[in-house]
Image (cartoon, rainbow, N blue to C red):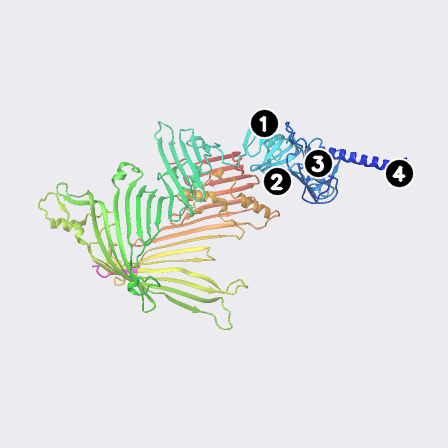
Amino acid sequence: MAFQKPSHTFTKIHLKALRTNTIKILFTLSFTVFINMLGFAQDIPKKGKTIPKSETVDQTKKDTTLVVNDSLINPVINQKVQDSTQNDSIPPKKGFLENNIVYHAQDYTTFDRKAHKMYLYNDAKIDYGDMNITAGNIVIDYTKNTVYAKGILDSIEGYTQKPVFTQGSNVVEPDSIIFNTKTKKALIFNSQTAQGEGTVIANVTKKENDSVYFIKNAKYTTAQNLEDPEYYIKLRKGKVVPGKKIVTGLANIFIYDVPTPVGLPFGFFPQSEKHTSGIIIPSFGEQNDRGYFLQNGGYYFAINDYFDLSVLGDYYTNGSYGLRTQSTYRKRYKFSGNVALRYESLISSERGFPDYSKSTIYNIQWSHSQDAKASPNSRFSASVNLGSSTYYRNSLNQINTGAFLNNTLSSSVSYSKTFMGEPQVNFSVTATHSQNTNTQQINMTLPTLQASMSRIYPFAPKNGSKKGVFENINFQYNLRAENRIQTTDDLFFTKAMFDDAKTGMQHSIPLTTNFKVFKYFSLSASTNYQEVWTLKTIKKYYDEVSRQFSTESVNGFDSFRTYNFSTSIGTTVYGMFNFEKEGKDRKIKAIRHIMRPSISYNINPAFDTYYDSVEIISADGQTREDIDRLYGDYTRFEQGVFGTPSKSFSSSMGISLSNNIEAKVRDRDSTATEPKKIKLLNNLNFSTSYNFAGDSLKLSPVRMSGGTTLLNNKLNVNFGATLDPYALDSDNNRINTLNVKNGGSIFRLTGANLNASWSFSSKDNKGNDRNKSGIEQNLRNGGRADDLLGVSEDFARRQNEGEDDKEKENAESELYNYKVPWSIRLAYAVNYSNSRRQNEISSHSLMFSGDIQLSDKWSVGGSSGYDLKNAGFTFTQLRFERDLLSWRMNFSWVPFSSRSSWNFFIGIKSSMLKDLKYEQRKQPDIQL
C-alpha cells in the first residue's frame, strides 16, 4: 500500500509552529538562566511579599515594599528547582546579597534591565541587614554593587528629603551618599553625624568599615544651630570611631567662623557612652599672699558601673596645698551615697617673718541612703559632716564659699532593724556627732543603742475593740545605752578623748491606760519604772590641807532605780462663728476655733538614799555639819549619762492649751462651688506648771508659742514668749514674790522671739533652679537649704546645670518675651531678752536673696543681710550669669568682709568639653 504524500500547506504550518515553539522555549530558558544569574524578580508581588532574587522587577505601582532573599524558584512552573551543585565538594561563592533587602518608595520603583539599576523615588527607604537608608531618591547599581542616595531638589522648598544613613547606633545625615554593599565602604558628602554630646560636620567623609570613619576639613561643635554654629573646632583631618573616640590632627577653635589661636597640633575627644577614667584639668589663678595656684585638678577613676573615685588637688606657689578625694557609689534598688575627704595645708607669709604661720585643716563628708525596697525590715543610713572647726572659714577653695558662715557641724550614722512578730521588737544603733565651730566644743555618742518592744495589752479581748480601763492597760519595754564623749578640736580622736567618755544604760517599763470619762473627756494614767546602770561614779571630799573641795572618779558598775506616776485629762472644743446671712454674700463665711485644753498631774518621789555626805580627809577643828552646810549632800551619779535620781519629792500639775483658728472665705474663682479654707493661726500654745511640794517659786513661767502662714502660704511667721509671774530683787535675782504684789504687772516678759520667712516670685519664675547644685553643696557642708548665705562658686562643675529647662524655655520663646521672671527670699529674726532687767534686743537681723532674669540670656542674683542691731551688712554675694548658647559666663562678687573677692568664668556647657574654659579670680587674704 502506498503512502499518501502530505499536503504542502499542512507541512509548512506545522514546521513553522514547531520552529516558533522551539525558539520560545530556548528564549525562555536562556532568559531564565540569565535572570537567575542576575538575581532579580520577574513577577510584581503584593506589598510586603518575599520574592526570589532570581527574578526581575519592572513596575510603576506606588507605595510598594519588596523583600528579596536567596530562594531559587522557577518562574515558569512556580516550583522549586533542584540545584545540581548542592552536592558539589567546592563550596559556592557568596551571592551579591548576604541579607534580605526591604525597600520602599512612595512614587515609583523601577528597574533598568540594560543598566542593571533600580530607581526608588520619593520617601525611598532601604533596609539591608543593620543598614538603613532613607532619602528622596535612591539608585541601586547592581553591576558596581553600590547604593547612591540623595535628596530631591524642589523649586519651592529647595533641597528636601536629604539622606539619613543609619548603621547600628550610628546616624549620619549627609547631602548625598554612595555605599558599597560588598566592601561596606561609603563616601558621604556634607554630613552631620551625632557623636556624644556634639555633632561632626564634614564636607567629605570616608566610611572605612562599621567602626572607622575618616574625615577631612570637618567641624566639631555642641551648638544647637548646625547651619550657623556659634563656635566649632576645625578638624583638618581626623579619624572617628563611633561611640569611642575622635582623633584629629591640627585643630583650633573658630568663633562665628573667626579663627582663634586656641588650638592643638593634635586632639583626642573621648566618645564613650560609659564612664571612663581621665585627667581633670585644673583651674589657674592668683592669690595675694599665696601666689599663683592650680585648683581642682586631678584624675577621675571610673572603677566600675557602681563606684567611681576622683582625686583632686590644689597647689600654691608659696607651698600651701590641698588634697581631696570624692567618690560616688550606687547600686540600683539597693543603696546610693557619696564620700568626700578634704585636707588643706595652709602657709601664710614667708618663713623667717614674724607673721609666718602654718596650719592644717580637714573635713570628712559621707552620705548614704538605702532604697526602701532593699530590705523592708532593716535600714542603714549615714549623714556625716565633721572636721576642723575652722575649715569653712579658712578653706581656700571656692567650693566652700556658701558654707563660710556655718557654725555647726553634725553627723549621724544609724542602723535599725525590726523583728516582726508579737510583740514586735525594734532595734537600732546610732553614732552621732555635734560640733560648735565657734567654741570648738564637740559632743559625740559612740554609739547609742536602743531597743524597744511594742505595747502589750494583757487584758484586751481577742476580737473587737478595747473598751474601759482594764482592757486598755498596756506596757512595753525600752532600752537605751550610750557611750557619750565630750571633747574639743585639740583632743579629737586622741586617747584623752576616750578616757573622759561616759557610759550608761537606761531600762524603762511604762504602764499606761486610757479611757473616756463624761463622754467628751479623754483620761490617761501611767506609771514608769526606770533603772539606770553606769560604769563610772564620783566621790567628793574636802581636803583641809589645801582647803579645797575635790572630786575623783570611781570606776566600777553601779545603778539606781526610780519610778513616778502621772495622769492627764483633755478634750477638744470646737467653736464656729457664722457670718453668712440669708440674701447676703459675705467675703468671710465662717471662722472655726479649735481649742485643746489639757491638765496633767505628776508625782516624783524623793530618792535621797542615793545621796551621800562629803568626806573629810583630815579634821582640824571643822565639823562635818559645817561641811554639809557649806556644800550639802551629793549623789555619786552626778556625772552620769542619764541624769540623777530626784532628791526631793515633787507633786506638780501642768496646764496647757493649744489653739487653731481657720476661716472659710469666698473663693476668687467664680467656678468654685465650695468656700476656700485658710488658716489664720496654725497653732497658738500656752503652758505652765505648779509644784505643790515646792518650798518657793512653785509656779513656773508661762511659755507661749505660735505660728501662722500668710499670703497664700508664702509668708511663714513663728513667734514665742516667756512670761514670769515672779519679781526680781535689787540684784536682779528671782524672789518668791509675785510680780503683781511687787508693784508690777501679772507677768513679766523675760524673753521673746519672732521669725519670719517670705518667698515670692513671678508666675513664670523657676525659683532657685539656677543655684541648685550650689545649694546642694551648701546642704552637704551643713548649711542652709537656700541661697541666703551665698552659694558655692565652683562654676566649672555647674556648666551644664539646668540645660533641660533652658532648652524648653528656648523652644517656647522664639519671639521676644516681655515678661521678666524674678524671685525674692526674705528671712527676718529678732530676739528680746529681759530675764535680769537687761531689756535689750539681743539679736536683730534681716537676710535677703533674689534673682531676676533681665532677658532670655541674662540673669542677676544676690544674697546679703543687714544686722539691725549693729547697723552693718552681713556676708554679701552678687551673682551675674550670661547664657551664650553653647557657652556660659558667670561672675561672682563678694564686695566686702574678710572674704571680699571676685570670680569670673566662661566655658562650654557640654560636659565633654568642660575643660575648654577660662577662669580668673581674686581671692582674699585668709586670716588665720
**Against 374, is 924 above or below?**
above
The answer to whether 445 appears left or right of 137 in the picture is left
Amino acid type, callout 1:
Leu
Say which of 342 and 377 sits in front.
377
The residue to which callout 4 is attached is 10
Cβ–Cβ below 8 Å for labels 3 and 2? Answer: no
Residue 187 falls within the magenta-colored stretch: no
Residue 683 lies, in percent from the top left, at 38, 59
Q: Quadrant of residue 73?
A: top right
Residue 78 lies, in percent from the top left, at 71, 40
**Residue 116 shows up from this direction:** no
The residue to which callout 2 is attached is 225
Q: Give the mark toward the camera: 1 or 4.
A: 4
Q: For the N terminus, which image quadrant? A: top right
Q: For the C terminus, which image quadrant? A: top left
Mark 1 or mark 3: name the one nearer the start of the chain.
3
The answer to whether 82 appears left or right of 250 in the picture is right
Say which of 615 and 132 sits in front.
132
Say which of 243 and 422 sits in front.
422
Cβ–Cβ below 8 Å for labels 4 and 3? Answer: no
Q: CA distance from mark 3 to mark 2?
A: 48 Å
Q: CA distance from mark 2 to mark 4?
A: 83 Å
Q: CA distance from mark 1 to mark 3?
A: 51 Å
Q: CA distance from mark 4 to mark 3?
A: 41 Å
The residue to which callout 1 is attached is 250
Mark 2 or mark 4: name the one nearer the start of the chain.
4
**Against 62, is 351 above or below?**
above
Amino acid type, callout 3:
Ser
Residue 694 falls within the magenta-colored stretch: yes
The residue to which callout 3 is attached is 54
